[in-house]
Image: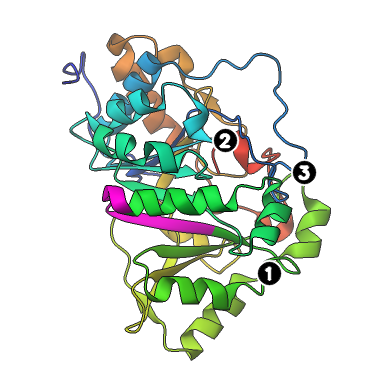
Amino acid sequence: MRLPPTLGKVNMSQLQDSFGRRFHYLRMSVTDVCNFKCTYCLPDGYKPDGKPKFLALNEIENLVAAFGEVGTQKIRITGGEPTLRKDFTDIVRIVADNDNINTVAMTTNGYRLEKHAKEWYDAGLRRINVSVDSLDPKMFYQITGENKFDEVMRGIDAALDAGFERIKINAVLLKGLNDKDLPRFLHWIKSTPIDLRFIELMETGLGHDYFNAHHLAGLDIKLKLESEGWLYDLPSVDDGPAQNFSHPDYQGRIGLIMPYAKNFCASCNRLRVSAKGKLHLCLFTENGLDLRDLLQHESQRAELIERLHSQLAQKEETHYLHQGITGVTKHLASIGG
């Protein structure tokens, strides 16, 4: 499928904010529904706010086309749990068929991977992040609220067999819960070619007490890794905020996402669009700007691109998590994490 040529006069320059940061990575949420009940995100499960009206396929196609014209090279499809959408494979094809997009990725809890990994690969998906917060099935159940550990692990094996170019495992660091899992994770990646990413717990609007009880600084893990011979890898252009490390004795790599580290926001290269079509310049700090009115027809693309450029001027230099200011984000599922 070929996208139609742009109509009208369009600013083709890459999206850039007033601090010189360029944005070539879009996290596109397609639903905020999730079937897991992770304690750090949706401890009471998903609760819909009325009947959700998530972006339709034609709106997604127009969104992808506009971002592709202003320098976006990588799109990560997120949720909630994105694969809950019955048209998920069609969404993958829309992104993959755009010639401006070099990398099609998704983040998932992995519960549908076993059955659909090959189908999604054939549709154009190339990179997968799977959330696995513990390799202990009992702790996995305690954190996620779902007894699906074996199912998720079989899904990861299916993804490896399907030929995905990069598989990452996301684990949120939680003091008193999974913080003793590091040796088990290291043993796994010694002979398995996957990237393991430890994500420092971030405070959200619903999680102040939880954050205080379970926050563990990613810097502690970094120092431990360096003491054991792990070496820092220079980032590539489409990498996210993780600091990546490799070791000559391991097939897998480790990445650390540390939002409380100094200068974390200096290398920001990503924007977010929610499942209902709001542009978010940061995971925290602001309410988001509605784009949906300009996603109805391809003839609106020039105006949509101008809106994107104008909004980048409003992007803040950093988040304010250090001051305990979490913005309007109630939970990470609401705008795709």
The answer to whether any part of residue 20 appears in the image is no
Along the horizontal axis of the image, is 161 left or right of 154? left
Quarter-wise, where is residue 137 in the image? bottom right
Task: Tell me the CA gap for discs 2 and 3.
Answer: 16 Å
- Residue indicated by mark 1: 216
Q: Amino acid at mark 1?
A: Leu
Please say whether residue 167 is one of the residues in the magenta stretch: yes
Q: CA distance from mark 1 to mark 2?
A: 24 Å
Front residue of 330 and 299: 330
Q: Position of residue 185 (x, y in %)?
A: 52, 71
Residue depth check, mark 1 versus mark 2: number of the one nearer the observer: 2
Q: Which residues are magenta?
A: 161-170
Q: Quadrant of the N terminus?
A: top left
Mark 2 or 3, nearer chain start: 2
Which of the two residues, 124 or 262, is positioned nearer the viewer here?
124
Tag 3: residue type?
Leu
Q: Position of residue 136 (x, y in %)?
A: 63, 64
Q: In the image, residue 223 lies at what x, y percent?
A: 54, 83
Q: Residue at x 61, y 38 (%)?
A: 333
* Image location of residue 128, percent across then percent down: 39, 48
Q: Earlier in the sequence, mark 1 or mark 2?
A: 2
- Magenta stretch contains residue 145: no
Does residue 269 appear left or right of residue 138 in this picture? left
* Residue 12 lies in quadrant: top left
Residue at image mark 2: 80
